């Protein structure tokens, strides 16, 4: 059985039931769907409330933080009070597309870190061309008890530092791409008790589904690529990553 730690089900608004049916048929017994602003975070909480085995995350994606004001976090905090919301995310830093509001991104990320700590929720972190900067902010603010770097893309030194912070490391469909040997090497280095998998659906569909819209059912293909990279049985990776996901999101407490 698999657990998809990162998806965006609000993007399949009219097909959520069908998408989740396919996921269950593929052996997926848990999905976390994450918002990127107030509207999508609220919708994720509603989807989670309506479907067994689905939980939600609430946050502003870094690309949505331009002009950040401290008051913005209040709306996310309200949504995060919902018991179906198990994560503050996805939040973080994205320096790939637009560096014109780096300060806003950093302030927004710091506010989300504080919220995760206040509420005792897992922090789900987006980093694109910004892993080192995110680590610096986490070190300065102090990390929450539970945190995960989604769609890992950092260097070996970054990985070491993230693990020292207590982070879980999540791999997405790009680990299956021929152009990503560095991700497969990273997967070999992650300790067994810190490894989780995700789809980031509808983005980053893994091989052999590349070029199609991604969905939680395809997390099995991501897990298969991780298992191959680690030279482990697929069943072992499924069991380990699912157990870790449930611990990350405190689902068995």
Image: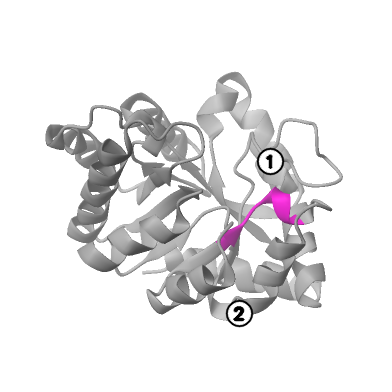
Residue position marked by numbered label 1 in the rendering? 204
Please provide percent x and percent y for residue 89: 38, 46
**Residue nearest the viewer, comparing 64 with 253:** 64
Q: Residue at x 43, y 34 (%)?
A: 44
Q: Is residue 211 left or right of residue 203?
A: right
Q: Earlier in the sequence, mark 1 or mark 2?
A: 2
Which residue does the image show at 43% across and 69% down from the upper left?
167
**Which is closer to the viewer, label 1 or label 2?**
1
Q: Is residue 66 left or right of residue 189?
A: left
**Which residue is farthest top?**
14
Residue located 23% across and 27% down the image: 67
* Residue 118 spot, x, y in % from top left: 17, 57
Q: Secondary structure at mark 1?
A: loop
Specify the segment rendered in magenta.
170-175
**What label sits on residue 192 in the rendered view?**
2
Within 10 Å of disc 2 (Cα), the crowding (few <14, some 14-19, many 20+) is some
């Amino acid at each position: 059985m698999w657990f998809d730690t990162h998806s965006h089900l609000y993007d399949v608004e009219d097909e959520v039931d069908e998408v989740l049916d396919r996921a269950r048929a593929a052996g997926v017994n848990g999905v976390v769907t994450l918002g990127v602003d107030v509207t999508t975070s609220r919708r994720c909480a509603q989807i989670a409330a309506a479907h067994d085995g689905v939980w939600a995350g609430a946050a502003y994606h870094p690309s949505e933080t331009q002009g950040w004001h401290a008051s913005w976090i209040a709306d996310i905090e309200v949504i995060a009070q919902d018991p179906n919301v198990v994560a503050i995310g996805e939040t973080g830093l994205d320096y790939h597309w637009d560096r014109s509001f780096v300060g806003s991104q950093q302030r927004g990320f710091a506010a989300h870190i504080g919220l995760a700590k206040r509420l005792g929720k897992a922090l789900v972190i987006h980093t694109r061309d910004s892993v080192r900067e995110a680590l610096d902010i986490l070190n300065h603010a102090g990390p929450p008890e539970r945190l995960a770097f989604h769609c890992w893309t950092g260097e070996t030194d970054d990985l070491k530092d993230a693990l020292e912070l207590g982070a879980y490391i999540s791999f997405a469909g790009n680990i299956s791409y021929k152009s990503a040997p560095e991700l497969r090497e990273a997967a070999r280095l992650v300790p067994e008790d810190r490894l989780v998998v995700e789809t980031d659906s509808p983005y980053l569909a893994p091989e052999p589904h590349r070029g199609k819209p991604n969905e939680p059912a395809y997390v099995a293909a991501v897990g298969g690529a991780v298992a191959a990279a680690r030279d482990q049985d697929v069943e072992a990776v499924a069991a380990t990553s699912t157990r870790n996901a449930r611990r990350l999101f405190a689902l068995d407490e």
